[in-house]
Amino acid sequence: MYNTDAFKAYDIRGKLPEQLNPELAYRIGRAYAHQLKPQRVAVGYDIRLSSPELAQAVSQGLIDGGAEVLSLGLVGTEEVYFATAELDLDGGIMVTASHNPKEYNGMKLVTKGARPISGDTGLREIEALVANAEFDQVTQASFEQKSKRYDISPAYTQHLMGYLNAAALRPLKVVVNAGNGAAGHMLDALEPLLPFELIKVHHQPDGNFPNGIPNPLLPENRQDTRNAVLEHGADFGVAWDGDVDRCFLFDEKGNFIEGYYIVGLLAQAFLRKQPKAKIIHDPRLTWNTIDIVEQEGGEAIMSKTGHAFIKERMRLEDAVYGGEMSAHHYFRDFAYCDSGMLPWLLIAELLCAQNCSLSSLVEAQQQAYPISGEINRKVSDPTAAVDSLLNHYRQDALNIDRTDGISLEFENWRFNLRSSNTEPVVRLNVESRANPTLMQQKTSELLQLLEQFI
């Protein structure tokens, strides 16, 4: 029996070499081929030093299982999604551990139409095959015979530009921090098509992560982007995680903008182009998004947190856009997948159209709905912690929602508390109506109540 500890709720992610190595990667390819019977599968990989070897191993597993492989090389996760949908392939595999430390790697799996393969849509079955199956040899074909190198960049770049009214764009100065991840080549391809001056920071891909793990959610990883915005007098800044499926924005003052407010901006932008459209959002922070969507005449629909749930709900509702406060943004015309390139381009278009600063666009939102930011606490018993806070506040709550963890609403504030899928951690988000003091007081109160479980 093989070790399958790397199999998580939504993807595969584990430590090298004990939880993921070329032998396991080969078996993942064989299991994928056995389970899904694909004819053609796209395979790409991120900038981690172990990624090319793991990509070749999973590709050989696919080939030995009877599939042909389109080898995309070094790409962002969204390029695998795009290739799978655009080329009408039977599936795609991205070798990446996203923002995890460099001793980790992993894989994100999709099937036809770039639909995610997660715990309840086939990943558990693939895991069981990886753990126990004895695979028969299906083909004697070599990697060279059944693997074709494919450059998806030109088609992908044109697809991105198709979302913009290029004639309405004006010169902007934008700091772009690839974090030594996979964003650099996409920016280089876009640069000649945009009237923007791109100030490139940590641009070259480097799996040694000389400037830290590319994860701008960590405050210590934001300073280089902030400094560059201020030094160059940029209109705004953008930073990406390692596999480019999330982007993070900084205003012209160098201030980091929480993803929650970007969801509101993008919802507004889509609704002004497509009135009465449906917008999907997650339960952690909701009031700002609902407020904007209703003001613009759209319909706000809440979904459980997580890319598989958001994508499924978007398909069900035919929603034009979906956003999570964690900086995942999903687009109907992008096969309902998340992209880290589209959000900043659409925000840039919005700045050009309204001829204003990014800070002025989000300032009203920030004042109307101040937030705590997501706070993680390690606890001895996550279930007991969630139940305890529910019981404490239940009587005074105007509304209780269990879409994801617990969300309790009161007249002027609300909170969401949910357990992590992968570790003994609870995640807390608090917001209020135009009252930062109340938000801070309630956040402190909630954290004090959680102390008994730490």
Image (cartoon, rainbow, N blue to C red):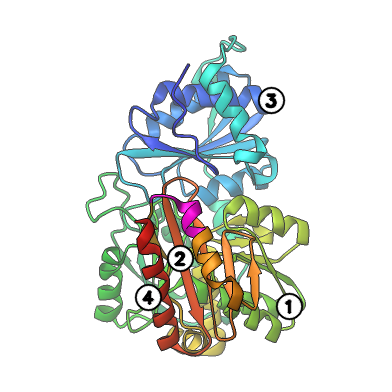
Main structural element of the magenta stretch: helix, strand or loop? helix
Q: Alpha-carbon neighbours of circle 2 within 10 Å: few (<14), some, or many (≥20)?
A: many
Dot 4: element: helix
Q: Is residue 173 left or right of residue 370?
A: left
The magenta-colored residue range is 380-386
Dot 3: element: loop
354 drawn magenta: no
Q: Earlier in the sequence, mark 4 or mark 1?
A: 1
- CA gap between label 4 and label 1 equals 35 Å
Residue drawn at x 49%, y 54% as measured from the top left: 384
Residue drawn at x 53%, y 87% as measured from the top left: 433
Instruction: State the residue position of label 4.
Output: 444
Question: In the figure, residue 286 lies in which quadrant?
Answer: bottom right
Pick the front one: 97 or 8? 8
Look at the numbered discs 4 and 3 and tell me whether their residues touch, using CB distance below 8 Å. Answer: no
Q: Is residue 223 left or right of residue 302?
A: left
Look at the numbered discs 1 and 3 and tell me whether their residues touch, using CB distance below 8 Å. Answer: no
Instruction: State the residue position of label 2.
Output: 428
Q: Quadrant of the C terminus?
A: bottom left
- CA gap between label 1 and label 3 equals 40 Å
Instruction: State the residue position of label 3.
Output: 37
